[in-house]
Amino acid sequence: MNIFLTSPISFPGLGIEGIDPPDGFCIPGTNFEIKFYGVIIAIGVLLAVTYCLRRAKQFGVTQDDILNLVLICLPSAIVGARLYYVVFEWNQFFGPGIPWYRFLDIRSGGLAIYGGVIGAGLGMLIYTRVRKLKIFPFLDLTGIGLLLGQAIGRWGNFFNREAHGGMTTCFLRMGLVENGALQYFHPTFLYESVWNLTGFVVLHFLSKKRKFDGQMFLAYLAWYGAGRMVIEGLRTDSLWLGSVRVSQLLAAVTMLLSLGILLYQAIFVRHDPAKMQVNRVAAAEAAAASAADAPSTSEAAPPETPVQESIPQEDELEVVYDFNLYSARHRVCLRVRTPRSNPQIHTIAEIYPIAHWHEREIHEFFGIVFIGHPYLIPLLLPEDAEYHPLLKDYSA
């Protein structure tokens, strides 16, 4: 129970006295209360998602994938945050006289940010594996967005008068009233909010000069871990494993590991910028744009051109389309031939979205360039593969 929930708040070192923000409000005409903690968290998530959408192209990912990840990672983050808290506060939720379903009541509090990050990460891993996408560009982008969301979300603790540290006399001290007596504490939520916001600005600009996919996510782990390791030591509501603060230990481990990997990458690894996802996508788009300027072999032949033979010639490749568009009750059956030496065909993915995957697969195995396709990235082969294994002239 939070004994400070109705206490006024003061920051005498900043000249702020007698703030008394409500912890929630009721929807007019109902008794259903909405907590400001949830509202602040929602604002943080919205700003983080907006940031990721605006910078998606700069990381070589699509906005559609970002939105799909929001639908998957947001629920998995809530589940992870709750499970993390319940595991380390087991006696609060399971025992004599405690309803078995109490652990489901997240409105009563009990969410841990590290559990949320782990849950969201698992959701992202599953999504990228199923879609056969590289996970590191998404981790880079969401790591920066997370710092922004966490900087905003920490102010939910302000409305709840929670997540503060021990007593102090420092100039940033936060005053709370307990049993009629004014006491001053470390406003650790404020420390973490400022630290995260600073990290967001730093990583935002550093990301424009990143050398490899995954670099920004490692930087996020290092930055957040360093701040959380120190700030967690000031808090009075830590989750404990024996005599160890769980989040402080996890922060220290992730900080050291990520810093070690970053140093190793900087000293011993030479990175090829062309292998970064954003540069690979840009190169594919440039190739498609260049191919679009060339005469298309899929255009209708002039009347005087003889009708093509039924069997493709040895110097040709033939693509057979057979797609249904149920929304328009339309079906297309089409055969297109293209020179084997420079195989290029206009994409139909904008009309038949399902063709997006099929065209990627054909490009991967036969080397046919689909002009205008937004994402000609291999599904199974290494991304730097320069061979097409289903061509008859391919030799392993």
Image (tube, grey):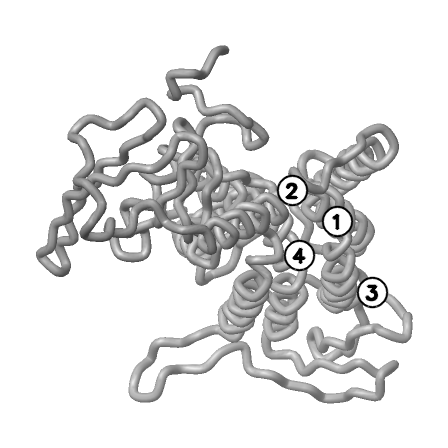
Q: Residues within 10 Å of mark 1 (few under 14, many from 20)?
A: some
- Say above or below: 122 vs 196: above
Please indicate whether residue 28 sits to the left or right of residue 352 in the image.
right
Q: Amino acid at mark 3?
A: Met
| Quarter of the picture holding the N terminus | bottom right
Residue highlighted by disc 4: 144
The answer to which of marks 2 and 4 sits earlier in the sequence is 4
Residue reaching furthest to the left? 329
Between 109 and 312, which is closer to the camera in this rendering?
A: 312
Instruction: State the SS at label 4.
Output: helix
The residues bearing labels 2 and 1 have C-alpha atoms spaced at a distance of 10 Å
Find out whether the residues at labels 1 and 3 contact each other: C-beta distance under 8 Å: no
| Dot label at residue 210 | 1
The answer to which of marks 1 and 3 sits earlier in the sequence is 3
Residue highlighted by disc 3: 167
Find out whether the residues at labels 1 and 4 contact each other: C-beta distance under 8 Å: no
- Say above or below: 56 vs 50: above
